[in-house]
Amino acid sequence: MTVQELREEIVQKTEEINGYLESRDADKAEEALAEKRKLQKLLAVREAEDDEEREDLGRQKKQKESRSTGAVSELRAAVKFALHGKAALTDEERAAVNIDGNAAILPEQFVNDIQVLRAGFPSLKNHCHIIKASSNHGKMPFAKIGGKKLKKYKSGTKLTGEAANTEDIQYNIENYGALVPIANDLQEDEAVNIVQEVIKPDFAEAGVNTENDEIMQIVEGSAVDKSTGAKDWRDVKKIIDGVLPTLRGRVVVITNLSGSVYLKSQEDKNGRNLDLVKEVNGKEYFQGKELITLSDEDITASATGKMIFYVVNLYALVKFFERKGYTVSTDKSVFFESDELALKVQERFDCEKLDERADFKVEFTPA
């Protein structure tokens, strides 16, 4: 019951007691008084509980506002560093900003916001082997999936070192970014608004598209062509079934919009849809493998009217090296003629190829 409901019942009980007193009914008056006291105890508990809820909501609101204020302060400090350098920062701003060379790493909340915005675009990166790199250049050993076994050692057997079946992958992380011209005398708050309202949403979409381009270059360059004799979607299924068991688990099917429409439109001889594409938790699946649909501009068939599909284990094929976070900096030379600064937001990554045993392409002209 609510506080108001309890208070109303207490008022009614009080009137009831007064009635019994007027009629000199002591027993009923005493019974009604006991019920009134019980209602008063319940009211005290309910009021205390409501106070605690209000305090909890107040604390949560303050924490949320504090996080939001902290994120904005970090972003403002990062942008101020990009515009004016470290010397212009206060001690508090220097403590808030994370500097990497001549750029400032944008705060965690900015990164989280980017990830939320990116969720609306099909990302191939999520299926690759993502490695957090601490430097822009280097090499790292990787072992291919499958065929590994442990050696049995008996008690007392001397252990010998054996070379692992690994391959060193060289990586060279590049910067990918967006440039926005700004006035030389732009204030920090105005620059922050540009980063939040202009760069962030565009950067989310552009970042996914750029990563997809780099990944698809590896997929297309390494794919084994299985198009000979292919006639319809059943040939895509055959390729999936023929992938090595050790690599089949992480296989995805990549196609363009035309290929996706083709799969969804397939019917049996009686005109009933075959329901080849299933949707589970917002993701589409074909033959139990996630179906990733890019645009026809991103994946183009070799001829008009042909359907194109890639069956690939991106985790085995692509090693995606990335540096932590996004950075903001300025460049005074890009828009020199117009006397403007270039506000530059960047992400840093590199894609390298390893295991191409599960990378196939199939094209066909549907009957």
Image (tube, rainbow, N blue to C red):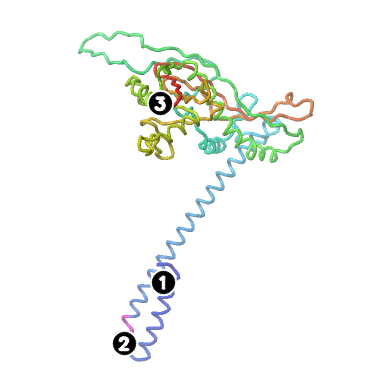
Mark 2 and mark 1 lie on one chain; the one further toward the N terminus is: 1
Amino acid on which the number 2 mark rests in the picture: Ala
Q: Nearer the viewer, residue 92 or 364?
A: 364
Q: Which span is picked out in magenta?
A: 27-31
The amino acid beneath tag 3 is Asp
Residue 270 as seen in the image, left or right of residue 223: left
Which quadrant does the C terminus fall into?
A: top left
On screen, residue 151 versus residue 299, left or right, reads: left
| Magenta stretch, main secondary structure class | helix
Q: Which residue is mark 1?
A: 6
Lower position in the chain sequence, tag 2 or tag 3:
2
Q: Quadrant of residue 328?
A: top right
Tell me whether circle 2 and circle 3 mark residues in contact (CB < 8 Å).
no
At 58% from the left and 40% from the top, the residue drawn is 71
On the image, the x and y values in percent for residue 91 come to 64, 35
Mark 2 lies on residue? 26
Q: Secondary structure at mark 3?
A: loop
The residue at the far left in this view is 155
| Label 2 – label 1 distance at C-alpha | 24 Å
Specify the amino acid type for callout 1: Leu
Q: On the image, numbered disc 3 is attached to which residue?
A: 232
Helix, strand or loop for disc 2: helix
Cβ atoms under marks 2 and 1 closer than 8 Å: no
Q: Secondary structure at mark 1?
A: helix
Identify the disc placed on residue 363: none
Q: Label 1 neighbourhood size at 10 Å, few (<14), some (14-19), many (20+)?
A: some
Q: Which callout, 2 or 1, points to the residue nearer the camera? A: 1
